[in-house]
């Protein structure tokens, strides 16, 4: 051990850098670049074949984001362990803050030095980190006891409901689902899971009453889009038309009539995947879903491999977060899920979700590089 | 201990990891399936929906084919016209735009109604060009064009307008076109039917498919906001075919003028005295004309109404078909104002009725050739069989009169035709029986409709025993046979049928059928199958009508050495004359109210020696066939043969 440490300390900065570089997971890097590139290309099409207003910004953000990701990847991963509590506290504070000083029709954003910043997105990562730290510290025997899970449940539900009340049902549900998945992952008893499920199901009427009218509308319209084909159902119907009319090969890049003629709502953000499906067809859609799968599987492989519980939980959490992003967004655009407002990371226009995902992947990469060295 | 729990934990986590991976797989799999379903299985459906979003389709009307006469003179053609179109989308305030347009130009109510209907039926709620009116005058266009900035929502389109250069002269034959409506059932054209004009009557209706041509298609690419961003013609129009009719417009024009004049004299309306006189006269329609007629008693009268047909007896081509009063089909292409339409519709003389094809009249004495032929063909009489006419034939308690009050004395068949003796034909009728007479009439073309190129045509009535039993459930009576024998009673014919009858007699060999189209029949007719000697005899008799010293039309010989006409007059009683009236002495025709006057008929052919054209003249309530109808026929033949 000593020997190893000595040898390690003797190494020059350069050799450390290159040894870290060689440990980078190339699948992750390549997938990120590919998906970001798809995003740029799609946003170019969404603007009718122009770099402005979205594609250029997206490209700049992507490059900066990837740099940030690489920097995080080279940081030793115990930094995240140490920062976890602080990040959660900051996240909670900003979620409370956004209630008071939030901008936008619905209070989701905080404007910080010209940047619109969405605390709920960052909260997802903070939640993963703090849950990782909590379970890592808990005596392993206590993991079997139910009371161990009380604090984590509070940690999940508190931010979750804060976000839902913004109101942002999509992100709020993502946070709760993410947290629950982590609890399930670390081995909460099946009995408890089933009880929770029943409780949740029985609280549906109560939650229904708490929903805003537009949220209720969305769910009702999801169940039957035709009830309001020109109102709230319009988005789902038009999105399905766009996807369906794409066929196997699609209508061709820049040739999607639904998006070009503005039948597609939010074609540059939440419905960007619809545009891709319309123009690139079944082939393109499946290809992009497959890239996401490669990314998620790579993360899961790391999670499976790493030794420390913190690393395991954090990598799993980030992988699951990506999965949630993917399935919520694509499930929504193809009419499998209600329109809840969930971006498609790296492709949708919007800085916060990209930042969240890239920071997350930075953390995963850091864990991948450093996990076996310390802890 | 610690090691063991560590192992347990790892085991649990692996298990959960595995379970969650399955969950993820299922979710991603179902998303994949969803895309497969949408994009591969239901692709067609969504493609259609997407196209419906992207495009809206327009029909481009083709240029309608022309209608020509036998010398290629234009009966119906197309003129450049202007249409006003609303570039409709969800954001256009239709009522406001129309209101503002109406302050500048007039748009007729019918067009506006159609327009609003189109707006209502536009369920798509996507943008479309909707026709406001097709009948914009050059003046209106310039008025609107000056202020076009105020009307970004409307645009002009060059369109074709149907025009009938011959106007009223051939109105019944050409018919007219009008906007498509659901009633025109055999045509199935869906979108933008406002652009579609279909023939409503006459040749325009009969040949609608040929004349119409094929619609082109245009599609506009429309954004969700309703802006048209591109327009593409993807199916060119194919112009309609021309139709060449057998009509001779020179003859037609002459015939109308001559027919309407009758025996009256033309007077100009410009004379002030006349104007005063007109004001006192009721029931005279002088709107839009600058001349009128005066009868022998100096009364202002309407133009004669009725029908005149000239037909080629070799190929059945109709050279001239007059139905008076007529109408000008151009009024349907222009702003048809409600008043003009009501005038046409409610006019007591029904100008919209094509009397030549669908007007039915008792044929009167013009039928006598058919009765004579029936008798000869069945061997009931020979050429020399004589009957005695004392002016009256009594059957039971009722008496049947001859038109000659004191009778014709003893006479044979040829003399009976020449002098149109009614009693002779009463005797013939009694001998032959109605069924055999009916058979001959049908053979000669009565009681049936031909495939002449006008949709509305009447079959007329050729009664027989069965017919009456079926209609009334009553036995046929002897008296009815007598009536039928002189072309009265149940018997009803159209002028076209009478012309056909004369053509068949004059032709002698073939069952001529009429047509309005050039070179259509190509002389392919069935054989007539009537003994030609009998026919020659009847024809000789018809010559006698004109040339004989006692002929009913003897006053109206053509008088040319080369060309003479042959024919038969007919005077049809419209009101029953009671015995009491007969005793008092009949009121002269011209002293009765118009509606109660006799119909004057003449059927004939010329040249008598080598028949070429058949003619029928029916002057409604015109008086006697010999004095009113015959001179018209003579003048027509004079015109045709230039003598």
Image (cartoon, rainbow, N blue to C red):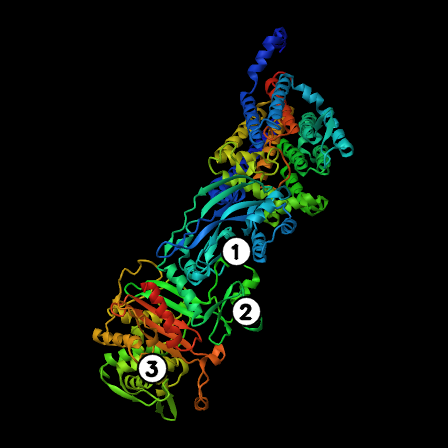
Q: Which mark is residue B334?
A: 1
Horizontally, residue B579 falls left or right of residue B123, namely left
Q: Is residue B33 visible?
A: no
Which numbered disc, 3 or 2, marks the residue closer to the eye? 2
Query: With respect to residue B400, does A369 lie above or below?
Result: above
Q: Nearer the viewer, residue B532 or A323?
A: B532
State the CA–CA distance, disc 1 to disc 3.
49 Å
Tell me residue B389's x, y (percent): 31, 88
Q: Residue at x 44, y 61 (%)?
A: B169
Q: Earlier in the sequence, mark 1 or mark 2?
A: 2
Q: Does dot 1 land on a helix, a strand or a loop?
A: loop
Q: Which residue is mark 2?
A: B274
State which quarter of the image contains the N terminus of chain A.
top right
Q: Which residue is mark 3?
A: B485
Q: Are dots 1 and 3 on a single chain?
A: yes
Tell me residue A76's x, y (percent): 65, 17
Q: Earlier in the sequence, mark 1 or mark 3?
A: 1
């Amino acid at each position: 051990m000593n020997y190893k440490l000595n040898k390690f300390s003797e190494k020059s900065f350069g050799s450390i850098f290159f040894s870290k570089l060689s440990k980078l997971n190339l699948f992750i890097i390549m997938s990120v670049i590919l998906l970001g590139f798809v995003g740029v290309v799609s946003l170019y099409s969404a603007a009718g074949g122009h770099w402005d207003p979205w594609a250029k910004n997206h490209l700049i953000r992507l490059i900066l984001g990837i740099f940030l990701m690489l920097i995080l990847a080279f940081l030793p991963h115990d930094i995240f362990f140490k920062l976890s509590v602080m990040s959660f506290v900051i996240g909670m504070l900003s979620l409370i803050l956004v209630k008071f000083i939030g901008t936008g029709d619905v209070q989701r954003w905080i404007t910080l030095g010209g940047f619109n910043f969405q605390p709920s997105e960052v909260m997802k990562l903070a939640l993963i980190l703090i849950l990782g730290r909590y379970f890592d510290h808990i005596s392993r025997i206590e993991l079997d006891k139910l009371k161990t899970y009380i604090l984590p449940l509070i940690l999940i539900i508190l931010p979750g409901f804060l976000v839902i009340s913004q109101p942002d049902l999509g992100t709020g549900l993502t946070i709760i689902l993410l947290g629950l998945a982590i609890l399930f992952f670390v081995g909460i008893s099946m009995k408890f899971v089933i009880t929770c499920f029943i409780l949740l199901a029985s609280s549906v009427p109560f939650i229904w009453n708490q929903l805003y009218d537009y949220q209720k509308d969305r769910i009702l319209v999801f169940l039957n889009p035709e009830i309001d084909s020109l109102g709230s159902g319009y988005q789902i119907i038009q999105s399905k038309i766009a996807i369906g009319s794409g066929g196997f090969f699609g209508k061709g890049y820049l040739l999607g009539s639904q998006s070009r003629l503005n039948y597609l709502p939010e074609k540059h953000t939440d419905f960007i995947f619809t545009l891709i499906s319309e123009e690139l067809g079944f082939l393109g859609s499946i290809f992009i879903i497959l890239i996401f799968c490669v990314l998620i599987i790579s993360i899961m492989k790391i999670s499976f491999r790493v030794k420390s519980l913190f690393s395991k939980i954090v990598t799993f959490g980030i992988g699951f977060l990506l999965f949630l992003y993917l399935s919520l967004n694509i499930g929504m655009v193809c009419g499998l899920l209600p329109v809840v407002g969930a971006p498609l990371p790296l492709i949708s226009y919007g800085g916060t979700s990209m930042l969240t995902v890239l920071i997350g992947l930075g953390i995963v990469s850091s864990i991948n590089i450093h996990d076996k060295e310390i802890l | 201990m610690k090691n063991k729990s560590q192992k347990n934990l790892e085991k649990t986590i692996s298990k959960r990891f595995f379970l969650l991976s399955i969950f993820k797989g299922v979710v991603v799999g179902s998303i994949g399936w969803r895309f497969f379903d949408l994009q591969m299985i239901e692709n067609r459906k969504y493609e259609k929906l997407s196209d419906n979003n992207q495009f809206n389709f327009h029909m481009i009307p083709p240029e309608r084919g022309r209608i020509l006469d036998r010398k290629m003179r234009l009966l119906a053609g197309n003129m450049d016209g202007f249409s006003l179109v609303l570039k409709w989308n969800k954001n256009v305030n239709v009522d406001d735009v129309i209101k503002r347009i109406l302050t500048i130009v007039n748009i007729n109510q019918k067009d506006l109604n159609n327009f609003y209907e189109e707006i209502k039926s536009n369920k798509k709620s996507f943008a479309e060009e909707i026709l406001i009116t097709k009948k914009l005058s050059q003046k209106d266009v310039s008025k609107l064009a000056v202020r076009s900035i105020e009307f970004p929502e409307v645009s002009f389109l060059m369109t074709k307008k149907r025009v009938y250069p011959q106007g009223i002269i051939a109105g019944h034959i050409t018919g007219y076109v009008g906007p498509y409506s659901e009633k025109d059932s055999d045509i199935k054209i869906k979108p933008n039917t406002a652009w579609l004009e279909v023939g409503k009557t006459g040749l325009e209706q009969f040949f609608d498919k040929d004349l119409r041509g094929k619609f082109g298609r245009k599609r506009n690419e429309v954004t969700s906001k309703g802006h048209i961003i591109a327009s593409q013609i993807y199916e060119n129009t194919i112009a309609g075919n021309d139709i060449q009719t057998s009509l001779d417009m020179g003859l037609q024009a002459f015939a109308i003028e001559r027919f309407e004049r009758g025996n009256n004299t033309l007077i100009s309306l410009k004379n002030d005295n006349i104007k005063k006189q007109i004001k006192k006269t009721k029931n005279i329609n002088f709107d839009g004309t600058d001349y009128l007629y005066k009868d022998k008693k100096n009364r202002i009268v309407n133009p004669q109404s009725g029908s005149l047909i000239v037909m080629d007896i070799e190929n059945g081509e109709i050279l001239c078909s007059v139905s008076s009063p007529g109408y000008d089909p151009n009024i349907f292409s222009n702003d048809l104002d409600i008043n003009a339409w009501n005038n046409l519709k409610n006019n007591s003389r029904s100008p919209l009725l094509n009397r030549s094809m669908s007007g039915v009249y008792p044929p009167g004495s013009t039928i006598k050739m058919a009765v004579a032929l029936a008798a000869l063909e069945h061997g009931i009489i020979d050429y020399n069989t004589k009957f005695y006419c004392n002016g009256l034939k009594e059957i039971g308690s009722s008496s049947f009169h001859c038109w000659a009050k004191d009778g014709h004395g003893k006479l044979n068949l040829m003399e009976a035709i020449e002098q149109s003796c009614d009693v002779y034909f009463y005797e013939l009728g009694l001998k032959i029986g109605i069924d055999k007479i009916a058979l001959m009439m049908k053979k000669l073309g009565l009681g049936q409709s031909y495939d002449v190129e006008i949709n509305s045509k009447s079959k007329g009535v050729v009664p027989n025993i069965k017919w009456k039993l079926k209609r009334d459930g009553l036995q046929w009576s002897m008296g009815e046979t007598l009536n039928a024998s002189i072309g009265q009673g149940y018997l009803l014919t159209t002028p076209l049928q009478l012309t056909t009858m004369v053509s068949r007699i004059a032709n002698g060999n073939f069952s001529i059928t009429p047509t309005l189209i050039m070179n259509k029949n190509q002389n392919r007719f069935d054989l007539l199958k009537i003994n030609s000697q009998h026919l020659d005899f009847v024809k000789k008799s018809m010559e006698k009508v004109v040339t004989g010293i006692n002929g009913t039309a003897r006053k109206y010989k053509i008088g040319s050495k080369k060309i003479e006409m042959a024919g038969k007059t007919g005077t049809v009683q419209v009101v029953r004359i009671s015995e009491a009236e007969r005793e008092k002495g009949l009121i002269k025709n011209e002293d009765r109210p118009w509606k109660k006057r006799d119909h004057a008929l003449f059927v004939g052919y010329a040249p008598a020696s080598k028949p070429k054209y058949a003619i029928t003249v029916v002057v409604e309530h015109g008086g006697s066939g010999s004095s009113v109808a015959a001179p018209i026929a003579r003048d027509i033949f004079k015109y045709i043969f230039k003598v």
